[in-house]
Image (cartoon, rainbow, N blue to C red):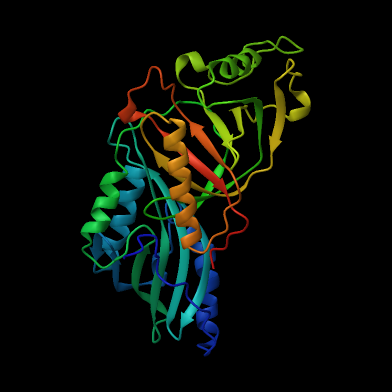
Amino acid sequence: MVDLETSPPSPKQDTTGGGGGMGELVDFLYRDLPHLFDDKGIDRKAYDAAVKFRDPITRHDDLNSYLLNIATLKLLFRPQFDLHWAKQTGPSEITTRWSMVMRFLLLPWQPQLVFTGTSVMSVNPETNKFIRHVDYWDSIVSSDFFSIEGLIDVIKQLRYYKMPHLEMPSYHILKRTASYQVRKYGPFSVVERDGDSLAGSGVFNDLAGYIFGKNSASQRMAVTPPVDGNTQASSSVDEKSEISIQFVLSSAKSMKSLPTPNEGVKLREVEGGIAGVSSFSGKPTESIVKEKEKSLRCRLIRNGLKPKPGCLLALYNDPDVTCEHIMRNEVLIWLEEFSLD
C-alpha cells in the first residue's frame, strides 16, 4: 500500500568536503531566498544562464523563463515563502527545505494554496553558479514532471469554502502532506465552558454572552458574534469524551486586561505549540469528529510523529445557516515534538 504522506527522504549533511565555495553558497541562500517574492528579488548573478528548473507541474530551461515564473507567481498568488534550512548534500549539491503559502487572486474567493517540500540545487563547479533546481512536494508521491498527481493536488486546493473575516490564532505551516498540515501555533487566549456535547446551545449562548458584555466590566469583546455564523470556536475532546467549548479572543487584549467572566465561564491562555491539522467539510457531528480524529492520529503515528491525547475541533461557520458543502472545519491534535530535519 502506497503511503501518500511519504516525502523525499531527509538529506544527510555531506561531509566529503567541497571547499569553502559550497559553504559560501549555503550562506548565500539563507540571505537570498527570503527575497524570492519581495521587491528585491533573488540575485540573478548566482544562476547560470542555462539553469534548468523542474517541479511537479512546471519546467523551465533558461534563466529568463525561470525568473518569469517567479514574477508570475508573485503577481497572481502573492506567495509567502519561508526557508527552514539549507545544507550541502553533495560535492556540488545543496538541498533546502521550505514552505510556501499563497492565494490565487484571480478567483473571487481567493483560495489559499499551500506547498511544502525540498529543493535540490545543483552547482556548476567551474562557475560556482546554480545550474539546476528541482522541487519535491511533500503532498505527493512522485514529483517528476509532468505529475498528474501534482496537478490534482493544486486543483483540490482551489475549492470554495466559506471563511469568516475575523482574527484567528497565528501559526506557521511547517509541512503539508496529502491529508494534513503540521503547524506551529503561537499563544492565544480563549473563553471557555465545559459542556456535554459539541452541539450544546446553552454553552454557546453563555460564551456569546461573555463576548456581548455579560462580564464584570459589561465590556463587549472584539470577536465576530456567532449569530452571524462567523464565529471561530473550538472544542476539546479527550479520550473520555470530556468536552470544552471555546471562543478564541482577539490578540489585541492581554489576559490581564480581559474582564472577569460570569460563573461557569473561564478565561485561559493556550500556550500554542506544534499540531497536526486535518480539514474537512460538512456538519461536524460528534461521530464524524471522532472518525476524523482517529484517522488523523493514525496518520501522524504512521509517519513517526507523537500525538498527544485529545483533539481540538475548529469551527469556522455556523452549521445552522451554512451549506454543508462549503463549511470549513478542522481537527487539531497537539504533538509531543516535531523536527524538519
Note whether residue 38 is visible: no
Instruction: Give whichever of 332, 81 is nearer the camera.
Output: 332
Would you say 159 lies left or right of 175 here?
Answer: left
Q: Quadrant of the C terminus?
A: bottom right
Question: Residue at (42%, 61%) from the top-left corner?
Answer: 117
- x%, y% of residue 119? 40, 67
| Whole-percent x, y for residue 79 in the image | 41, 47
Q: Height in image: 156 above or below 302? A: above
Q: Quadrant of residue 8?
A: bottom left
Residue at the farthest bottom position: 16
Answer with left or right where residue 303 lies relative to residue 242.
left
Rendered view: 52 above or below 165:
below
Residue under the point 31% across and 33% down: 160
Could you tell me how many numbered marks the image carries? 0
Q: Quadrant of residue 67?
A: bottom left
Q: Is residue 42 visible?
A: yes
Q: Is residue 66 left or right of residue 188?
A: left
